[in-house]
Amino acid sequence: GELTLRWRGTGENAEAQLLSTMLWRPSDRGPIGTGPFVLVAQDAGQILLRRRDPSLLRVGEVQLVSFPTPREAFAAALRGETNMLLMPDDGQLELLVGVDKLRLIHGPGVHSVVALFNPARLAAADRKGLALAVPIEPVAAAYGPLCQPHGPNPAGPMPTGRRLDLLVANSPQGLIRTALAVRRALGPRGGAVSIVTLEEARNRATSGDFDILIATLQTWPEEFSASRWLTGSPRNLTGYSSARVDAALRAGASSLAQQELAADPPALVFCRLERTAAVDSLLIDARLGDYDMLDSLETWQVAR
C-alpha cells in the first residue's frame, strides 16, 4: 500500500532526525518494518533476525550475540564460533593477519576524534584561537592508523591564557594517546590529563567539569553533525549555544551553519575514524554500509 509520512519537528531539522529514524509497527504476525530482516527472537544475550523473503546465496539469518568482554568476542571469532567481528582494536587487527577463515574489510566511519571545548570556561575567541593553533596531523597520528586526518590547519600562534586541563575516557587507548598529544601541542597552556571511566567522562561533560574533553563524536553526515549544536539539543552535551548557529540550523542552511561553527567553534575535529570488521571468508562481497555498518547486509553474497 501507500505510506504517507507526516513529520513534526522538535527543534532539529527534519533531515537530520530522519537519519536516525526507523519505521515499524507491531502486528499479530510480529513486527512489520522497513528492513529486509524480521525480528524472530531476542533476549539479553542475543537478537535473531530472519530474511523476510529468502534469496539464494544471500544471508538468510542473522544472530547478533553479546559477549561479556571484547576479548571473549575476539576469541569466539578465532575459534570459528562467529562469522563476523565488528570493530576489532589495533592489537586484534594485527593478530587477524594471516587467519585464513577471516578477512578484514574497511570503510569510512561516521565518528571522528575531537577535542570538545567547554564554552562556559573558554570564550569564543580563545576557542577559535586554540582550534587554529593545535596541529591536526600529529595529533591524528597519535591516535593510530585507523584515524584519517581531517585536514591540515594553519597552525597559528597559541593564544595566551591559563593552563587547560584535559579530560579523556580510559578506552579506547587511542583516545589517551590523543589527549597526551594535545597536551604537548598546547605547550605552556597544557595542563593535567585526567583519565576516567566513560561514565565519569560523560557526567563531567554534562556538568561542565572540564576544560577540554577528548572524545569521539559523530561528524557524518554533516547535516546531522551540525544539528547537534542547536541550543538545548539533547545531543549537545557541552551546553554550547550560538544564536547565529541556531538561526542557520532552523533555516535549514547547512553551509551557513558550518561557517558559523567555524567562527565560534564548539570543538576541533582531528580525524575521521575508519570502521573495520573481520568477516567469514565465505561472505565473498561483504562490505560496510555508509551509515550503519550492516546497512548493506541484505546484498552480501555467500559462496557456494
Image: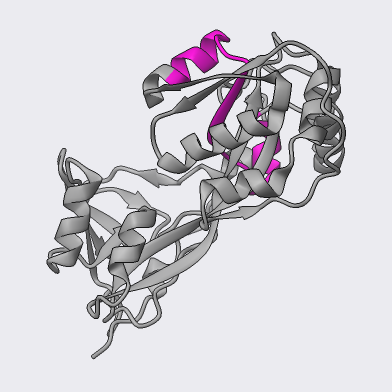
Say how many tags the image has.
0
Q: Report if residue 47 is visible in the image.
A: no
- Magenta part of the protein: which range? 201-228
Position above or below: 165 against 43: above
The answer, for residue 270, to whether it is visible in the render is: yes
The residue lying toward the viewer, choosing from 285 and 274, is: 274
Query: Magenta stretch containing residue 125, yes or no?
Result: no
Is 67 above or below relative to 180? below
Question: In which image quadrant can residue 181 be found?
Answer: top right
- The residue furthest bottom is 304
Look at the picture and state if 157 lies above or below 232.
Answer: below
Q: Is residue 122 rendered to the left or right of residue 171?
A: right
Dividing the picture into quadrants, the one containing residue 5 is top right
Measured as percent of width and height from the top left, residue 223 is found at 70, 43
Say which of 106 and 59 sits in front.
Answer: 106
Give the residue drawn at x 78%, y 27%: 130
Quadrant showing the C terminus:
bottom left
Q: Position of residue 292 (x, y in %)?
A: 47, 54
- Residue 179's quadrant in the figure? top right
- Residue placed at 32% from the left, 72% from the top? 97
Colour basis: one colour
For the point 51% across and 64% down, the residue is: 107
Q: Position of residue 168 (x, y in %)?
A: 49, 27
- Above or below residue 219? Residue 49 is below
Query: Looking at the image, which is closer to me, 12 or 26?
Result: 12
Q: Is residue 150 left or right of residue 3?
A: right
Q: Is residue 218 magenta?
A: yes
Q: Residue at x 46, y 20 (%)?
A: 202
Q: Position of residue 67 (x, y in %)?
A: 18, 46
